Image (tube, rainbow, N blue to C red):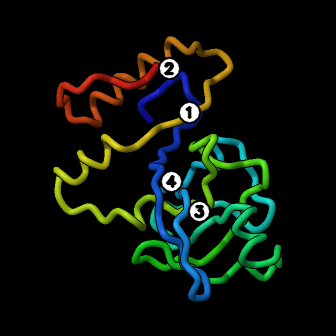
Amino acid sequence: AGTQSLRGVAATLSMESDLAIDGESQFIGAELVSGNYAGVFGVRPSLGRWLVDDREPVAVISDAIWERYFNRRPDVLGRVIQSGTDSYTIVGVAPREFTGVRAPLRTDLWVPIETRFRLGSEAEERRLARMLMFFGHLRPDATARQATAELNALDIQMRGSSGSEPKAS
């Protein structure tokens, strides 16, 4: 809402997390994302759907996880997995070529940001805002300079004018 030069802005927080499936657990790359993440990146699932709500307890898994744990079976949709202390229902599988924002590292799990972070205090919200990364799609008639100025202004606003240096470039 705070930009004229971008047609969409998505938020993501990259992290490592455990993933438990049928009693087997491993450490993976995960992203906590806003509901519009796939739309901003222009990525379509190879199976199922992407996340649409920041609070819905659902997950999109990577093609690699789909192959390793589910033998690429289409009945993966609806299965429940565990990440951290939270349970998620699988609603989609990312296309093989999409590995998230952690490149060259691979993301294996995408979950809605608000399912993992249940913020209580203003201090917690500010801490989370400092860790988020934002990505956007430039409108055809806009310049990167315009987008940078708008994003820097939003960064300062989100950080509560804490005096930290803006990160957009």
Q: Earlier in the sequence, mark 4 or mark 2?
A: 4
Contact between marks 2 and 1 (CB within 8 A): the answer is: yes
Q: Earlier in the sequence, mark 3 or mark 4?
A: 4
Contact between marks 3 and 4 (CB within 8 A): the answer is: no
* Residue, disc 1: 136
- Residue depth check, mark 3 versus mark 4: number of the one nearer the observer: 3
Q: Earlier in the sequence, mark 1 or mark 3?
A: 3
Q: Earlier in the sequence, mark 2 or mark 1?
A: 1
* Residue, disc 4: 33
Q: Secondary structure at mark 4?
A: strand
- Cα–Cα gap, marks 4 and 2: 21 Å
* Residue, disc 3: 109
* Residue, disc 2: 147
Q: Position of residue 138 (x, y in %)?
A: 61, 25
Q: Amino acid at mark 2?
A: Ala
- Cα–Cα gap, marks 1 and 4: 13 Å
Quadrant containing the N terminus is top left
Q: Position of residue 126 (x, y in %)?
A: 23, 45
Eyeballing the image, is 71 above or below 4? below
